[in-house]
Amino acid sequence: MFNRIYVPIDNSDISDKVLQEAIKLAKSSTAKLRIAHVVNLEQITFGIEMVGVAELKDALLSIGQSLIDKVKLQLATAGVDAEVKLIENFGSEMSALVAEDAKEFGADLFILGSHHLGSFSHFITGGIAEDLAKETEVPILLITKHKQK
């Protein structure tokens, strides 16, 4: 059985599904959860002197904090105690950053969502799940968004 489950999320529908699966697994076991959301601030660090950059950073962090607050409420409503963490990223590879935080947590399972963006989008943007699988030996439970017929 898994004891320490790491769940990276974003502001997407699939992350809602991932969170629900993580809650179910935590409730059916004694596993500890860490839910993490990464705010990517890399694109604004180069122009820190520019007008409006501080406001943009504050806005991005505010959006991230809103997600964290929503997740904390969902966890409390479900009766699940979990660590919920906002991570600021200033240029690290997302998968390396997540793998490092998960290692610090002692994770023995990842629960991730897959957006199924299509092969071209995957080629351009890469896949966090695929990149993470290359970064770690920790098993990954992949939650997908099935197509509606």
Image (cartoon, rainbow, N blue to C red):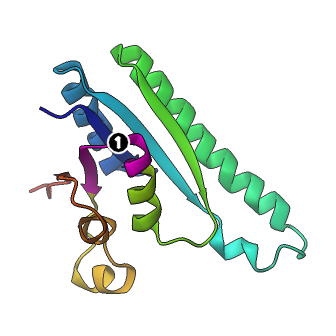
- Residue 31: x and y, percent? 25, 26
Q: Is residue 123 magenta?
A: no
Res 9 visible = no
Amino acid type indicated by mark 1:
Gly
Q: Is residue 107 magenta?
A: yes
Callout 1 crowding tier (Cα within 10 Å): few <14, some 14–19, many ≥20: some
Residue 126 to residue 136: above or below: below
Q: Position of residue 6 (x, y in %)?
A: 34, 43
Q: Quadrant of residue 122?
A: bottom left
**SS category of the residue bearing label 1:** loop
The picture places residue 10, in percent across and down from the top left corner, at 44, 52
Q: Is residue 12 left or right of residue 132?
A: right
Q: Is residue 91 above or below residue 74?
A: below
Q: Quadrant of the C terminus?
A: bottom left
Q: At 32% from the left edge and 81% from the top edge, which residue is drawn?
A: 121
- From this viewpoint, which residue is outermost toward the left? 149
Q: Is residue 33 visible?
A: yes
Q: Image check: 110 left or right of 99?
A: left
Q: Which residues are magenta?
A: 102-113
Is 54 placed left or right of 32 in the picture? right
Residue under pointer 1: 106
Q: Is residue 3 above or below residue 98?
A: above
- Identify the residue shown where x is 16% and y is 20%: 28
